[in-house]
Image: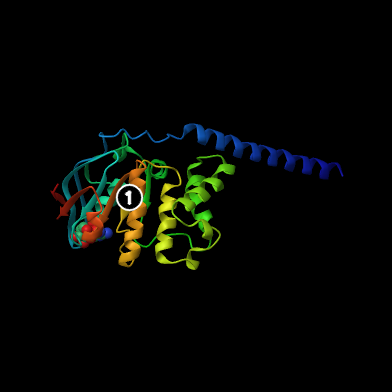
Amino acid sequence: MIYFRAHNDIHCIISYIVFHKLIIDEMLDSQTINQPELAVPDLPIIELRRLSKSYHTPAGAIPALRGLDLSVTAGEFLAVVGKSGAGKSTLVNMVTGIDRPDSGDICIAGTELHHLSEDDRARWRGLNLGVVFQFFQLLPSISLIKNVTIPMEFCGVYAPKERRERALHILEQVGLAEHVHKRPSEISGGQQQRVAIARALANDPPILVADEPTGNLDSRTSDEIMDVFAGMVEQGKTLLIVTHDRGVARRATRQVRIVDGLIEQD
Ligand code: ADP
């Protein structure tokens, strides 16, 4: 009997310690998060200097970026156009910190990205950048609202109670108020891309990066998605969009062309 009571007590104490450790970890996490710096209009928010990147294959090195320079001002709506193989996806991977350059500097929203470890880059990305992909990349087995709360949970921003409300608000902003409890497979491609934009906005990052966001949509839906993006720029976001679609690029306020890993026209 005494053994059982002692055994239970130990379990209680362990549970108590684990529970409090979780709470303390959460508090420490939320204290050590570096909130994104506020974007200052007319100052560069994205600075890429002499960026080089090659892929090493058994057949040899394939250069993708060859000393690329690019500066994007806060609040700008920039389209990067270029043919297939020009280096657009590699550029997106550099700006989002998904991959590292062989050489060169990447300074985004005041952070020298190339100096961060992989874990720090993931955390930094969650707070500073919203990324939108061609194929939406939503989690299929959970509701739209849950898809949008996940980045907040990952970065530990906003109080847990606030997250759901915030996700609802953003989904309303992109015109999906009536669908928030559906799963991605229950809505159209255009609506899925709206969810992806809502997810990108979850942590209120200063910058949005979109990689061929209309590449999987018909032209009318494309226009609607570009309207959503234009609205975000009006609200002060900086938008870098990579596209091979001239119509999409024309919606931007600035266009640059990437050719063989270099910015050719600005
Ligand atoms: P884009 O997005 O404009 O089509 P990419 O950045 O994907 O261009 O590719 C730039 C160059 O790098 C191309 O020559 C491409 O074949 C090459 N490349 C891209 N990714 C890889 C990889 N993982 N391995 C080998 N070569 C790659």
From the top left corner, tell me how far across and down residue 160 is, in percent. Answer: 57, 43
Residue at image coords 23%, 55%: 249
Can residue 261 be seen here? The reply is no
**Could you tell me the amino acid type at mark 1?**
Ala
Residue pointed to by mark 1: 230
Place of residue 9 in the rendered image (x, y in percent of width and height, measured from the top left): 77, 40
Say left or right for 179 vs 207.
Answer: right
Q: Nearer the viewer, residue 146 or 218?
A: 218
Q: Secondary structure at mark 1?
A: helix
Q: Is mark 1 within 8 Å of ligand 1?
A: no
Q: Does residue 246 appear left or right of residue 228 in this picture? A: left
**Quadrant of image for the N terminus:** top right
Ligand 1 resides in the quarter of the picture at bottom left
In x, y percent, where is residue 208? 34, 47
Tell me if I can see residue 186 in this picture. Answer: yes
Identity of the residue furthest to the right in this view: 1
| Camera-nearest residue between 51 and 137 | 137
Q: Residue, x 32% and y 68% (percent of image)?
A: 218
